[in-house]
Amino acid sequence: MSYREEIAVDKGIDNTLSFLLEGYHYISNRTNTFGRNMFKTRLLGGKLFICMVGEEAAEVFYDTHKFKRHGAAPKRVIQTLFGAKGLQTLDDNIHHHRKALFMDMMHKKSLKKINEIVKNEWIKALQNWEHQDEIVLYEEAKLVLTRSACIWAGVPLLKSEEIKRTKELSALFEAGGAIGARHIRGLIDRDRVEEWAAELITSVREGTINVEKDTPLYKISFHKDLKDNYLDVHIASVELINILRPIVAIAVYVVFCALGLKQFPEEREKLYQAGDRSYKNYVQEIRRYYPFFPMVIAQVKSDFLWKGHDFKKDTHVLLDIYGTNHHPDLWESPYHFQPDRFAKWHESPFSFIPQGGGDYESGHRCPGEWLTVNVMMTILKLLVHRMSYDVPEQNLTYSFTKMPSLPKSKFIMKNVRHI
């Protein structure tokens, strides 16, 4: 007879309110209390959820034989963040085939290209910032990254529409876990940006827009599914947005990079004399230490037994990303900011999961993770070496209930100078 053990239960008919009030800490608060890395709860109208944290939990969670993504995410997340029938909602062969499309855009030449674009666009913006009394880094970074993403992807973007597209693309991740007015704004902007993307796809296919064959816009426009048909225009538009939106979302990490330099000035001094390895360590610690998206969701494919507990088909499972990146069994002094920890870190696909875990090619780990790291390193070098600025008194606290989190002032800079 197989070993079985009852796991802890967060009692209550529906614990959604506690989930919303505790945000990033909801799962870890309970695993710490229970002394276990797994527990049951009821959320979203009383649905049964299993919540997990840690390296072993991540390893089983990213086992595609045990878990599926299709139908797992709440409708409001699909409606704003992911888009219907996009990569993040697929499984098995169709997922592998679509994932190959995204991985084909992440080769070294492509990463080098976006680094150069981001650097050039940042310096252009920096020359304008010099003439302003102050700038809000988050808003400016989103605009730079929207321009950069479109240039890199081969997407034509008129100067007159830069602010509009920046607003629409950023609304998708800013409303990803929102309720009320923010969610409604996200829905409206999702419709607008999908319509724009669909027009681009159609124009490329009809030949009224000429784009280079190595660009994401071209590759998505002419990608064929497993039946050798072009993707439906709507699905292709969703996938184009799934390339652009995450690049704009790097603005959140950019703000945390700047916040880290402010909160830990000794790290700026280290970086000033450092090489690429130290910049990468700093960026990785930013991704580990500060809150981004708190967790990921999946559903059990079919019944299985793990750690003495029965996982029943269709049960929803939440993996705590923030908690795993701060788990005391995995990280020494997890709530201290220590970039040097990554100098000795032996890479694990399941212990450090800011953008998901597991295998890039066949699993659900974010295909754009190294693009994110590269862009962050590029901008960090600019912050340290190519510009000077003052950080005035402001509210730099950040919420652990708003998802994704961000300093309340969005990081105001004064007296910005290009050096």
Image (cartoon, rainbow, N blue to C red):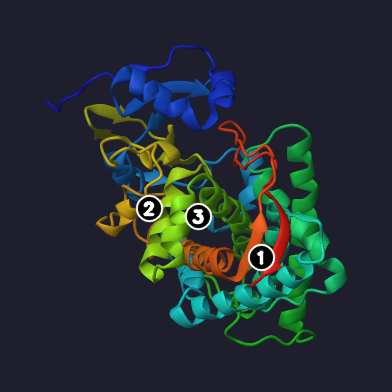
Say which residue appears at 48% left-offset and 83% top-offset: 109
Q: Nearer the viewer, mark 3 or mark 2?
A: 2
Give the side of residue 318 with respect to residue 410, left or right: left
- Residue at the far right: name it: 160
Q: Position of residue 130 (x, y in %)?
A: 76, 66
Disc 1, SS: helix
Distance (Cα) linking label 2 and label 1 = 25 Å
Q: Quadrant of the N terminus?
A: top left
Q: Is any atom of residue 334 visible in this view?
A: yes
Q: Amino acid at mark 3?
A: Leu
Give the side of residue 403 with respect to residue 2, left or right: right
Distance (Cα) linking label 3 and label 2 = 35 Å
- Mark 1 crowd level (few <14, some 14–19, many ≥20, 10 Å Cα): many
Q: Is any atom of residue 349 visible in this view?
A: no
Q: Which mark is residue 90?
A: 3
Q: Which mark is residue 43?
A: none
Q: Which residue is mark 2?
A: 339
Classify 283 as above or below 81.
below
Q: Which residue is mark 1?
A: 145
Q: Amino acid at mark 1?
A: Leu
Say which residue appears at 41% left-offset and 51% top-offset: 285
Q: Position of residue 31 (x, y in %)?
A: 35, 24
282 or 28, nearer to the observer? 282
Disc 3, SS: loop
Say which residue appears at 68% left-offset and 38% top-offset: 408
Q: Amino acid at mark 2?
A: Pro
Q: Quadrant of residue 193?
A: bottom right
Q: Position of residue 253 (x, y in %)?
A: 56, 53
Q: Earlier in the sequence, mark 3 or mark 1?
A: 3
- Residue at the far left: name it: 1
